[in-house]
């Protein structure tokens, strides 16, 4: 039996201390968070309906982000190939849309389904033209209107719409 195995230098050299330290760190990560500590981010979805006979419909999703911003994802079930569809959320004043509230990304039509995602939105444009900070709760509680237009060249050609918010 060799006494060298049990000296502090040999124990450290053999990796026992390193292995025990790694095991303790892993155990801390596994047991350190309870189910109550987990953050639940919210999201809402609203149906997009076709305007006219074009058949373009889909879903708009509003999702809460950790940093109090929100993300808007628009999924269209079809699109017009090689056409840039213009999408924006408009203020809703007394039942009619007025002024862009949230400028969304435009999507290039593929002839099939397309998705446009505008991330980390912090501000909206009020009906007066002033910018206002907005978070997930505020965008959901203030009804607005999504409008999808055929293209920049045909800005009056509305192809889909959705009521966003409650």
Image (cartoon, grey):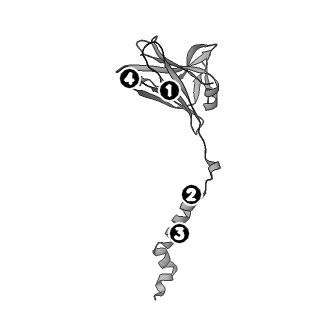
Task: Report if the CB atoms under discs 4 and 1 are less than 8 Å apart.
Answer: no
10 Å crowding of disc 1: few (<14), some (14-19), many (20+):
some
10 Å crowding of disc 3: few (<14), some (14-19), many (20+):
few
Q: Which residue is mark 3?
A: 20
Q: Which residue is mark 1?
A: 59
Question: Which residue is pictured at 40% across the width and 20% down the height?
Answer: 84
Rendering quarter of residue 144: top right
Question: Which residue is pictured at 51% across the width and 22% down the height?
Answer: 48
Task: Report if the CB atoms under discs 3 and 2 are less than 8 Å apart.
Answer: no
In the structure shown, which secondary structural element does the residue marked by tag 3 occupy? helix
Residue 155 place in picture, x, y as percent: 45, 12
Question: Which residue is pictured at 37% across the width and 25% down the height?
Answer: 112
Question: Which residue is pictured at 43% across the width and 18% down the height?
Answer: 55
Q: Which residue is mark 2?
A: 30
Residue 74 place in picture, x, y as percent: 48, 27
- Let me know if residue 73 appears in the view: yes
Q: CA distance from mark 2 to mark 4?
A: 46 Å
Residue lying farthest to the bottom in this orientation: 1
Residue 127 place in picture, x, y as percent: 61, 16
Q: Which residue is mark 4?
A: 109
Dot 3 or dot 1: first in sequence order is 3
Dot 3 or dot 2: first in sequence order is 3
- Let me know if residue 133 appears in the view: no
Q: CA distance from mark 2 to mark 1?
A: 37 Å
10 Å crowding of disc 4: few (<14), some (14-19), many (20+):
many
Q: Mark 4 or mark 1, which is nearer to you?
A: 1
40, above or below 165, in the image: below
Q: CA distance from mark 3 to mark 2?
A: 15 Å
């Amino acid at each position: 039996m060799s006494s060298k195995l049990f000296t502090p230098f040999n124990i450290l050299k053999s990796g026992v201390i390193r292995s025990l330290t790694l095991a303790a760190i892993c155990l801390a990560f596994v047991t350190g968070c309870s189910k109550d500590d987990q953050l639940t981010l919210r999201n809402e979805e609203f149906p997009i309906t076709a305007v006219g006979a074009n058949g373009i419909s889909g879903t708009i999703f509003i999702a809460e982000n950790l940093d109090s911003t929100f993300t808007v994802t628009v999924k269209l079930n079809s699109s017009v190939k090689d056409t840039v569809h213009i999408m924006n959320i408009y203020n809703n004043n007394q039942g009619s849309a007025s002024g862009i509230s949230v400028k969304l990304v435009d999507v290039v039509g593929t002839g099939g389904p397309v998705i446009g995602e505008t991330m980390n939105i912090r501000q909206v444009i009020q009906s007066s033209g002033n910018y206002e900070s907005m978070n997930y709760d505020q965008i959901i509680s203030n009804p607005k209107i999504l409008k999808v237009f055929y293209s920049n060249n045909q800005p009056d050609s509305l192809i889909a719409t959705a009521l966003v918010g409650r």
